[in-house]
Amino acid sequence: MEITITYNFFLFFLLHMCLKCHGCMDKERDALLQIKSSINSPQGTAFPRWYGDDCCQWEGVKCNPTTTRVIRISFQHKRDQSLPELWYPNATLFAQFKDLQELELPGNQIGGLISPNELARLKQLQKIDVHNNSIEVGSHLCWGKIPSLHFLDLSRNKLQGNIPKCLCENLHVKELSLSNNFLIGNIDACLRNMTSLEYLNLSHNSFNASFSLSHFANFSRLSYLDISWNSLEIETESITWIPSFNLSVLNLAACNLKIIPSFISSQRHLESLDLSYNALAGKIPSRVLDNVSKELQLRGNVFIGPFPKPFQNSSQLNGLDISDNCLSGSFPEDLGLNFPELHYLNASWNNFSGRLPPSFVAMKQLLFLELSGNQFHGEIPYGMTSNMSSLEYLGLSQNNLTGDALPENSSLPKLRWLYLHRNHFTGNFPDSLSKSMDLLLADIRETDMSGELSSYLHVLPQIRVLLLGGNNFEGQIPQQLCQMRHLQILDLSRNNLSGGIPKCIDNITSWTNEKPSLNFPREPWTTVELNFKGWSYTFSGSHVSHLYAIDISFNRLTGTIAVQMTQLDVIRSLNLSNNLLTGQIPVTFEKMISLESLDLSRNILSGKVSQELQTLTFLVVLNVSFNNLSGRLPFERQFATFDESSYLGNPGLCGRPLDKECDEVLEGPFFLLPNKDTTYTLLLPSLCASFFLCLEQNARV
Ligand SMILES: *[C@@H]1O[C@H](CO)[C@@H](O)[C@H](O)[C@H]1NC(C)=O
Ligand SMILES: *[C@@H]1O[C@H](CO)[C@@H](O)[C@H](O)[C@H]1NC(C)=O
Ligand SMILES: *[C@@H]1O[C@H](CO)[C@@H](O)[C@H](O)[C@H]1NC(C)=O
Ligand SMILES: *[C@@H]1O[C@H](CO)[C@@H](O)[C@H](O)[C@H]1NC(C)=O
Ligand SMILES: *[C@@H]1O[C@H](CO)[C@@H](O)[C@H](O)[C@H]1NC(C)=O
Ligand SMILES: *[C@@H]1O[C@H](CO)[C@@H](O)[C@H](O)[C@H]1NC(C)=O
Ligand SMILES: *[C@@H]1O[C@H](CO)[C@@H](O)[C@H](O)[C@H]1NC(C)=O
Ligand SMILES: *[C@@H]1O[C@H](CO)[C@@H](O)[C@H](O)[C@H]1NC(C)=O
Ligand SMILES: *[C@@H]1O[C@H](CO)[C@@H](O)[C@H](O)[C@H]1NC(C)=O
Ligand SMILES: *[C@@H]1O[C@H](CO)[C@@H](O)[C@H](O)[C@H]1NC(C)=O
């Protein structure tokens, strides 16, 4: 009995609890529904799951469990992108949540807040995040003073003019980001009194009034400061200035600095320093290396002298970028010992010379090594490739390296990007690459490698971009390629390859399947230089992921153009020029509907340029010159844009755009209607004409 009573009581208690926990306040639920209908107004199609009583459970809503009041509203990309106008939410919508602490609305196509002063009623509001919207006018953000506001992210909007003064009244803000807007004028006038700031990001704007860092001298809590990429002249050497802050991150890239700011030496906790793209000259002082504990970027200055040496024997740096300077001399022998913690080293585009030191082997964590564009000579030391178990990126292009492209028995199991082009290697395709099963991109063009490619090329199962042009490879095009199913860009041009185009080429499913390939390396350092539409382009980052191209020009390939090749319907550029290909241009080219550039010039192709090719509506460059083609040219759609330069050196071709008229008796469409299966239907049954035609047909076979 007692047990039942207790049990009943317990049930009642539970029920009561649940009523309470389901009891999101009616008023706040109504307010949320108003937001919902406002987002895609007038349709109100956002948040299909915002229904039912307990709004605390709704996506993007968080309540205080005790009071059941909404304390956080957070959603992104909810505004329907297809609506022509921006969203101008009335701040009253949000002002109804008395206990709201965090308001996060990034990426919702907000053009501004209407009645922003309403937000000042929210005494608990700590965080406003409206980054990645389209707010242009500062007055849309004038909510007055919100004493509790600590965090304000307005980056990636379209703010113009000066920093809106009203924002600077929020004196307790600790984190402020205004980066990636169009702000102009000066920095300090407005921010001067915001001494609580710990994080300040003003990068990528158009601030143009010269500015002295000394204005921040009293910002004692400042720890992160980014003023990079403005049009500023920054004054750092004011005499009276003693910074009261200890920064952990300082980014002054592209700030027109001519000397390394001397206050940096007073910074004892600096983890990351970026002084890239300034006008810094002279030698790189050791003290900078010693001041920074993790990442130092000095790219794009005019530093001279040798590779910088840390004061202490060994630096703790994880990342060092000294690329694009005028540094010279050879690398220190004990480089690896000086920087044993490096993950990232970029010393490309300097004047370094001499041999590469084997001490790289001491950099056990190295992920990214870029030394292209120097004058290193000699062989790649075994120490650099023998046991680099972390290395994902190796760039040694445009040096004078000799010997094997990779030393024998190299082991680079994590390698994904390999740039070795323009060196003077000898020997075959590097055998040890077979251990790099994750390789995505290999650019080994113009390196003097030779040998029978098909005997040395292993199947690289993940490869997307394989560039082997401009070597002396011989033999057939390797069948192994057909098993590299993710291949997108292949360059075998300017070698000495012979034999036919492999019939298995349509096994490469990335060339026949429109699905964009997953996990394509979109990193900005994915760069590919490519002949495309007759010009040399450099593609990088995500632009490479949409490129599908085959260049096997300048070889000694024979046989006909394999029909299988014409099944590759995502290829955008095909270059088979300067080979010894014979036979006809397959009519099935009409299936290569993505083709923008087709170069079949300087082969021995015969037959006609079929009318069917007019289905190639993206084709902007066509070159079939210097073959043995004949007959009337197509001249509709894209073909009407090609001039005679596309057809030079084919005496048998006729019709527009050439001056030569077609022989009406034989070629005129009035007499002949070519059928798909190439049998001819005669409209005018003239014995003489058909006899002639037979002769002509036989002659071609
Ligand atoms: C914003 O909403 C409030 C309350 O609904 C209303 O009084 C005010 O007029 C609105 N502001 C504008 C500019 O529409
Ligand atoms: C900063 O504070 C001083 C003194 O409190 C005041 O006179 C000045 O107007 C303030 N400046 C700004 C830009 O708010
Ligand atoms: C920093 O504070 C000191 C002492 O409070 C004051 O004399 C100085 O003017 C302040 N500097 C700036 C730039 O506000
Ligand atoms: C900066 O760091 C130094 C050394 O650690 C310390 O003495 C000083 O108090 C710090 N200053 C501030 C404002 O934190
Ligand atoms: C620096 O290197 C030298 C020579 O290799 C050695 O004698 C010295 O002990 C090292 N100093 C430190 C602080 O590691
Ligand atoms: C490669 O490095 C690992 C540790 O990084 C080590 O255990 C192994 O012995 C090394 N192998 C060779 C051949 O040096
Ligand atoms: C190309 O290969 C053939 C043998 O297949 C050889 O006779 C010729 O010399 C090679 N040409 C060049 C430029 O290496
Ligand atoms: C191409 O694919 C076919 C069918 O999947 C297979 O039989 C053939 O062995 C493949 N050829 C090559 C060279 O991979
Ligand atoms: C084809 O490749 C050759 C060099 O191999 C180049 O000169 C030509 O411009 C390329 N054709 C097109 C259309 O890009
Ligand atoms: C060119 O084609 C014609 C037939 O159209 C053929 O008779 C002739 O032999 C070909 N010339 C060459 C060099 O292949």
Image (cartoon, rainbow, N blue to C red):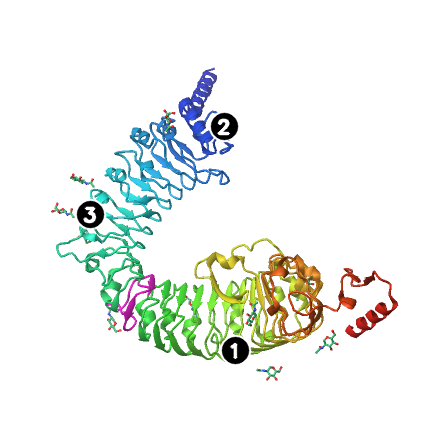
Residue 449's tag is 1
Q: Is residue 294 above or below residue 577?
A: above
As measured in the structure, the alpha-carbon distance from the residue carrying label 3 to the one carrying label 1 is 59 Å
Element on which disc 2 rests: loop
Outermost residue, left side: 240
387 or 644, which lies in front? Answer: 644
Q: Is residue 310 magenta?
A: yes
* Residue 420 seen in this snapshot: yes
Circle 3 residues within 10 Å: few <14, some 14–19, many ≥20: some
Question: Tag 3 or tag 2, which sits nearer the N-term?
Answer: 2
Q: Position of residue 478 (x, y in %)?
A: 62, 71
Q: Is mark 3 within 8 Å of ligand 4?
A: yes
* Quarter containing the C terminus: bottom right
Question: Tag 1 or tag 3, which sits nearer the N-term?
Answer: 3
As measured in the structure, the alpha-carbon distance from the residue carrying label 1 to the one carrying label 2 is 67 Å
**Amino acid beneath label 3:** Ser
Q: Position of residue 597 (x, y in %)?
A: 58, 63
Q: Is residue 657 above or below residue 217?
A: below
- Judged left or right of residue 94, residue 237 is left
Task: Look at the magenta stretch and give its main secondary structure.
Answer: loop
Residues under numbered marks 3 and 1 in contact, where contact means CB atoms less than 8 Å apart? no
| Residue identifier under label 3 | 220
Chain part drawn in magenta: 298-321
- Judged left or right of residue 544, residue 570 is right
Q: Is residue 511 magenta?
A: no
Which residue is rendered at x = 32% and y = 46% of the image? 178
Residue 420's tag is none
**Amino acid beneath label 1:** Met
Q: Position of residue 354 (x, y in %)?
A: 36, 78
| Residue identifier under label 2 | 51
